[in-house]
Image: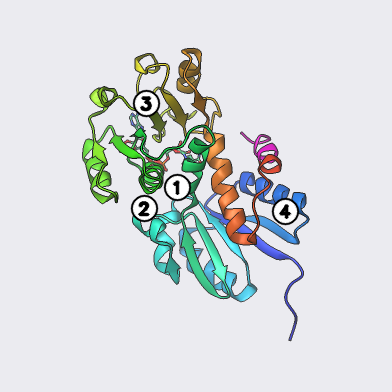
Amino acid sequence: MAGPSPITLCGSLSLFASPVGAAMHNAAYGELGLAFTYVPFSLEETQLADALIGMRALGIRGFGVSMPFKLSIMPLLDEIDPLARAIGAVNTVVNEHGKLVGHNTDAWGAVRALEEVQSVAGRRVLVLGAGGAARAVAFGLAEAGARVSVANRNQTKAEELVAELRGGTAEAVPLDTALGRGPEVIVNATSVGMESNPGQPIPAESIPSSTLVMDIVYKPLITAWLEGCRERGNPVIHGGRMLLHQAARQFQLYTGRGAPLTAMDRALREFV
Ligand code: NAP
């Protein structure tokens, strides 16, 4: 029988393979001299189950998972971490000796990105949006002890999201009065501000300049909204920090090592 492969393989599963994850992970492996490599794979939804059979057979250690597979992969896994189960989406699969375990590192990434600047426990945080990414952000923040408000264009979705959040202090608020609650932190977790969806989630000029503002959109890295907030004096965090920290958490899950953030960030900056 052949011995274990001298190189541990990780990768990503998406409809259109993106080079960004590979760049960050391979830079991290190189920085720490680990015998790991990361390959982005493109596939169709109908091939997902076969990809996981391959993962088991070949001993592939981890996969990052992009939309729309973050939902459809869930029933194909052996175990799902409780936070990912609550969020309802898996963006990372870890092969634990043949047992495939789903995680959601977007939640971790959002909280770490904010906590680089300010702790979130006990803070009033307004999350704009109630889509897939907003769910991860809101669950991560609630778990970290923030007092979460959610405002979304479709308010019913915001109400449904807060009803699922643990901790009991979350509330859904209408978009046009969301600032009335005096949030200390605002996170744009909508897709507004992307190159394909220009605009502002709420007017930058309505936000007090002391409020910490984070935009999770990372294409462009500095959205017009974030730039508007920065010009008005707000402390701001761009979407590259969440992207970096969610990948750093994946790295930690795959390798058991702390992630070399500077090397990963340098690699990320070549793409966004
Ligand atoms: P999604 O599930 O499609 O949700 C989109 C959200 O944006 C919904 O809340 C939607 O409101 C809102 N929205 C869209 N267009 C709008 C408009 N014109 N006016 C007001 N609200 C609008 O998308 P997603 O997967 O959550 O992704 C959202 C963003 O997060 C994307 O830019 C994505 O690239 C980014 N993201 C970043 C990271 C990171 O690591 N930085 C990770 C994941 C995702 P309705 O519910 O009313 O439609």
Position in image of residue 31 (x %, y %)? 76, 49
Nearer the observer, 201 or 169: 169
Q: Is residue 269 magenta?
A: yes
The residue identified by callout 1 is: 107
Residue found 47% across the figure and 62% down from its top: 102
Note whether 208 is above or below 166 in the view shown: above
The residue identified by callout 4 is: 29
Label count reads 4
Camera-nearest label, 3 or 1: 1
Cα distance in 3D space between marks 1 and 2: 9 Å
Q: Three-letter amino acid code at disc 3? A: Pro
Camera-nearest label, 3 or 2: 2
Way the structure is coloured = rainbow
Position in image of residue 69 (x %, y %)? 45, 56
Q: Are marks 4 and 3 in contact (CB under 8 Å)?
A: no
Nearer the observer, 175 or 213: 213
Q: Three-letter amino acid code at disc 2? A: Ile
The residue identified by callout 3 is: 201
Q: Is mark 3 within 8 Å of ligand 1?
A: yes
Say whether residue 8 is visible. Answer: yes
Say whether residue 41 is visible. Answer: no
Q: Is mark 2 within 8 Å of ligand 1?
A: no
The residue identified by callout 2 is: 87
Camera-nearest label, 4 or 3: 4
Q: Is tag 3's residue or tag 2's residue first in the polypeptide sequence?
A: 2
Cα distance in 3D space between marks 4 and 3: 37 Å
Identify the secondary structure beneath mark 4. helix
Q: Are marks 3 and 1 in contact (CB under 8 Å)?
A: no
Q: In the rendered structure, find residue 151 and report the number of the disc placed on it.
A: none
Identify the secondary structure beneath mark 1. helix
